[in-house]
Image (cartoon, coloured by chain):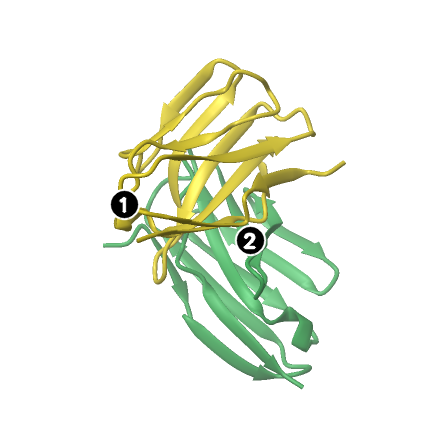
Chain colours: A yellow, B green
């Protein structure tokens, strides 16, 4: 099993550009989530999904959209990137509470 | 006030020392996670516990639900244990501490 995969690993955007961070898992986990990690702060939940077709907002959802058309995939969309979205983004999937994290995407918005 | 407090924030120790990292939280929880973030950035789940104690190799995690406190212990520490350790209590949502940066010197 590949576990949780994320692409790209690094990305630089200009303010106002849009992009999609990809996340996929092959463990058939129902629960998936997106976090951002900023210096000096703990991981913060952006959006999460408890199964295909179901998504909900986390602590810091503004500026981000998600969808969950399949169990495997949970993409995170930035509609109009802002410098405040410069961060490291982690996707995770969960089964019976244990979280499995992807390797992260380091995003810089200029 | 932060809902999750970890101490110490930074810890440097010699190889072989016994390490303790503490986590206090102010919310009611159903479980608590301990995570390890490697210097390269990857995050690994170490433990999920809701009571008592769990042990995996040289790592031991304890929790006292009444006192809202958990500890992570590392016995016979090794330089490869150098990482950031994150406490994350969970009820209907999961809240992450800011982490404890551990550096083990050879």
Q: Position of residue A93 (x, y in %)?
A: 57, 34
Residue at the location (32% across, 49% down)?
B26
Q: Alpha carbon of mark 1 to alpha carbon of mark 2: how far?
A: 33 Å
Q: Is residue A76 visible?
A: yes
Helix, strand, or loop for circle 2?
strand
**Badge 1 sits on which subunit?**
A
Residue at the location (48% across, 13% down)?
A53
Is residue B61 positioned above or below B31 on the image?
below
On residue B35, the disc is 2
Q: Nearer the viewer, residue B52 or A102?
A: A102
Quarter of the image where one finds residue A101: top right
Q: Nearer the viewer, residue A19 or B103?
A: A19
Q: Position of residue A21 (x, y in %)?
A: 48, 37
The N terminus of chain B: image quadrant: bottom left
Quarter of the image where one finds residue A27: top right
Quarter of the image where one finds residue B75: bottom right
Residue at the location (60% across, 20% down)?
A71
Q: Is residue B77 visible?
A: no
Residue at the top extreme, as displayed: A53
- Answer yes or no: do the residues labelled 1 and 2 have beta carbons within 8 Å? no
Q: Position of residue A57 (x, y in %)?
A: 34, 28
Q: Position of residue B84 (x, y in %)?
A: 52, 64
Q: Nearer the viewer, residue B9 or B41?
A: B41
**Badge 2 sits on which subunit?**
B
List the residue tagged with mark 1.
A15
On residue A36, the disc is none
Q: Give left or right: position of B7 versus B83.
A: left
The C terminus of chain B: image quadrant: bottom right
Helix, strand, or loop for circle 1?
loop
Q: Give left or right: position of B43 versus A47.
A: right
């Amino acid at each position: 099993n590949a576990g949780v995969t994320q692409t790209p690993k690094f990305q630089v955007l200009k303010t106002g550009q849009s992009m999609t961070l990809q996340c996929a898992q092959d463990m058939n986990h129902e629960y998936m989530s997106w976090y951002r990690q900023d210096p000096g702060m703990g991981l913060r939940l952006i959006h999460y999904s408890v199964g295909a077709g179901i998504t909900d907002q986390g602590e810091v959802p503004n500026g981000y959209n998600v969808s969950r058309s399949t169990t495997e995939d949970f993409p995170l969309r930035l509609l109009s990137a802002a410098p405040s979205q410069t961060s490291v983004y982690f996707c995770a999937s969960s089964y019976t509470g244990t979280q499995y994290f992807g390797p992260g995407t380091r995003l810089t918005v200029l | 006030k932060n809902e999750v407090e970890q101490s110490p924030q930074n810890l440097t120790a010699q190889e072989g020392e016994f390490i303790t990292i503490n986590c206090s939280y102010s919310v009611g929880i159903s479980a608590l996670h301990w995570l390890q973030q490697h210097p390269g950035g990857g995050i690994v789940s170490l433990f999920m516990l809701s009571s008592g104690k769990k042990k995996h190799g040289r790592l031991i995690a304890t929790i006292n639900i009444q006192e809202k406190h958990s500890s992570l212990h590392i016995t016979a520490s090794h330089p490869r244990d150098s990482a950031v350790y994150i406490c994350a209590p969970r009820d209907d949502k999961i809240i992450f501490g800011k982490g404890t940066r551990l550096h083990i010197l050879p």
